[in-house]
Amino acid sequence: MPPFSDTPVFDGHNDVLLRLRRSGKADPAKAFLDGENEGHIDLPRAREGGFAGGLCALYVPSPSYEKDADGNMPTPAQPDALNETMAMARLLFEIERRSAGDVTVCRTAADIRNAIAKGSFAAVFHIEGAEAIGADLDALYVLHQAGLRTLGPVWSRPNIFAFGVPFRFPSSPDIGPGLTDTGKALIRACNDLKIMIDLSHMNEKGFWDIAAISDAPLVASHSNVQALCQHSRNATDRQLDAIGETNGLIGINFGVLFLNKDGIKDPAIGVEPLIDHIDYVANRIGIDHIALGSDFDGTTIATALKDCRGVRLIVDRLKARGYDDAAIAKVTHENWIRVLGATWGA
Ligand SMILES: [Zn+2]
């Protein structure tokens, strides 16, 4: 296969595995590999759009949508979450196995570079919400051996490790307490194993607890800017500064809910608000600390982007705003590969 594009996009968050699992299709791996024109990502559209890969989330949905008084959905029980995680991991590896080299589950930064260079979709095994892992952390060690390289301790709900930030607007991310003792042990284990810790969905106290403990760059894989959209999922200026100071990054989420200053889910907002969030981070903490975290197949995106091929529009708009080729390469893939390589030590 030819390389993806002269400006490949490596992205910080997608939920394609969740979409495929939920689709009820008899052969979801085939649907991804052959393409089906549903949702945001499949392999033919990724190739067409130069969408070269990214962090593929294994996320276990809540057992019901009924929210408690704090606005949290219920947390899955650990055995159920582990079962579902196994099923999603199997799907990821089945996609790789049946792709004849067109999809690679990457474990090092070199794997990512090599995959993109030969036109193989570069997937990273990511867990969003660590409910599958018990307090003994046994599953963390086994999942790491299987290829797990990045982990968000929480989705937007509480678990034994920490308190995910509920979805609120307008609201700061400062909702609820910080890490539990088990959560602190999880962070230390991730540092030992060189698993990237993802701060998206963490509340503010949890963020600062991790900043105090972790020896890795601080990363929010799919979050936006509080100063432009006062959603609880978005980062404050202080959080952005900490991300910059640790040589980390923030991946801008394409979800209209996290972009729109009015907090309205409006798919007609176009592409410019997304570029505004990129611009804000680049101006505040520098071009080395801003990247993409689309949330494809996990959120409502601007109609103008349509699906993963829409990343070409983002590249065009960055050029129109005066970003040169080197800056665009950083935003679209270089920053992610640098930060992952620094965290993984390879
Ligand atoms: Zn998410």
Image (cartoon, grey):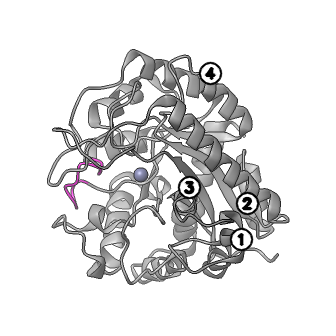
Front label number (1 vs 3) = 1
The answer to whether mark 3 and mark 2 are in CB contact below 8 A is: no
Q: Is residue 216 visible?
A: no
User: Which sits earlier in the primary sequence, circle 1 or circle 3?
Assistant: 1
The residue that disc 2 covers is 95
Q: Position of residue 286 (x, y in %)?
A: 42, 55
Residue 231 among those drawn in magenta: yes
Residue range of the region highlighted in magenta in the rendering = 226-235
User: Which sits earlier in the primary sequence, circle 1 or circle 4?
Assistant: 1
Of residue 29 and residue 300, the one placed in the foreground of this image is 29
Numbered circle sitting on residue 33: 1
Residue, x 66% and y 65% (percent of image)? 26
Tell me if residue 200 comes above or below residue 203 in the rendering. below
Tell me if residue 210 comes above or below residue 126 in the rendering. above
Q: Is residue 87 left or right of residue 38?
A: right
The residue that disc 3 covers is 335
The answer to whether mark 2 and mark 1 are in CB contact below 8 A is: yes
Residue 111 among those drawn in magenta: no
Q: Is residue 51 visible?
A: yes
Residue, x 81% and y 68% (percent of image)? 118
Numbered circle sitting on residue 138: 4
- Per the model, the C-alpha gap separating discs 4 and 3 is 31 Å
User: Is disc 4 surrounded by few (<14), some (14 to 19) or many (20+) residues within 10 Å?
Assistant: few
User: Is disc 3 surrounded by few (<14), some (14 to 19) or many (20+) residues within 10 Å?
Assistant: many
Q: Position of residue 154 (x, y in %)?
A: 41, 37
Tell me if residue 136 comes above or below residue 295 in the rendering. above
- Per the model, the C-alpha gap separating discs 2 and 4 is 26 Å
Which amino acid lies under the numbered mark 2 shown in the image of this protein?
Ile
- Per the model, the C-alpha gap separating discs 2 and 1 is 7 Å
Q: Element under label 1?
A: helix
